[in-house]
Amino acid sequence: MNSKRIIAALIDYIITGILQAIFMINFMMLPLINNQLDFALIMPRVLSITYVSMMYLILRDILGSKSIGKRIIKLRIIDQATGNEAPFLKRIARNVPLFLAPIEIIVFLVTQHRLGDRLAGTAVLE
């Protein structure tokens, strides 16, 4: 099961990387190549593009109740208290600890449960 979760997460991170690359090419690289970008705008654009990527990672489970990676691997997010599909706010709350990625990874490797799932009271099932 954990290998399926890892594969689903990798799919989501690959999508995030592709999304970020598309934005970087269109809003950073092409304007720089064509001398259409003032150097004072580089950092705000980089931060904005990074923000969009992070928002995808946090909000990825709200459309259709699961991320693209979970759809492909056929996983679902449930509320541990009820056993039903996790509500909207819990699906978002479980992804917020991704800002603490190193801690999240260590907790997952040691306990086999994500910190976000523990905090939100959710679980991922097949």
Image (tube, helix red, strand yellow):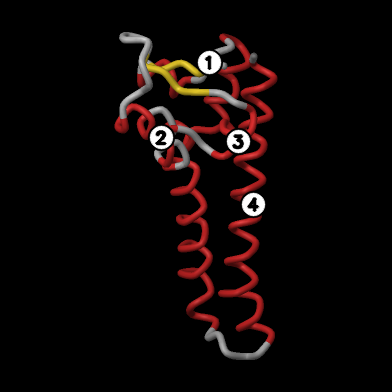
- Residue at 59% x, 57% y is 19
Do the numbered discs 3 and 2 sit on residues whose CB atoms are within 8 Å?
no
Distance, label 4 to label 3, CA atoms, is: 14 Å
Disc on the earlier residue, 3 or 1: 3
Instruction: Give the side of residue 61 with respect to residue 24, left or right.
Output: left
What percent of the width, then of the height, locates residue 63?
Answer: 42, 41
Disc on the earlier residue, 2 or 4: 4
SS under mark 3: helix
Disc 3 marks which amino acid?
Gly
* Viewer-nearest residue: 41 or 117: 117
What percent of the width, then of the height, locates residue 52?
Answer: 47, 56
What percent of the width, then of the height, locates residue 71?
Answer: 57, 33
Distance, label 1 to label 4, CA atoms, is: 26 Å
Distance, label 3 to label 1, CA atoms, is: 13 Å
What percent of the width, then of the height, locates residue 11?
Answer: 66, 39
Dot in front, 3 or 2: 3
Distance, label 1 to label 2, CA atoms, is: 20 Å
SS under mark 1: strand
* CA neighbours of label 4 inside 10 A, class few (<14), some (14 to 19), many (20+): few
* Viewer-nearest residue: 66 or 44: 66
Which residue is the site of mark 1?
A: 125
Which residue is the site of mark 2?
A: 96
Which residue is the site of mark 3?
A: 69
Disc on the earlier residue, 1 or 4: 4
- Residue at 53% x, 74% y is 42
Q: Which mark is residue 17?
A: 4
Disc on the earlier residue, 4 or 3: 4
Disc 2 marks which amino acid?
Val
* Viewer-nearest residue: 69 or 74: 74
Q: Indicate whether 42 appears above or below 52.
A: below
- Residue at 67% x, 45% y is 14
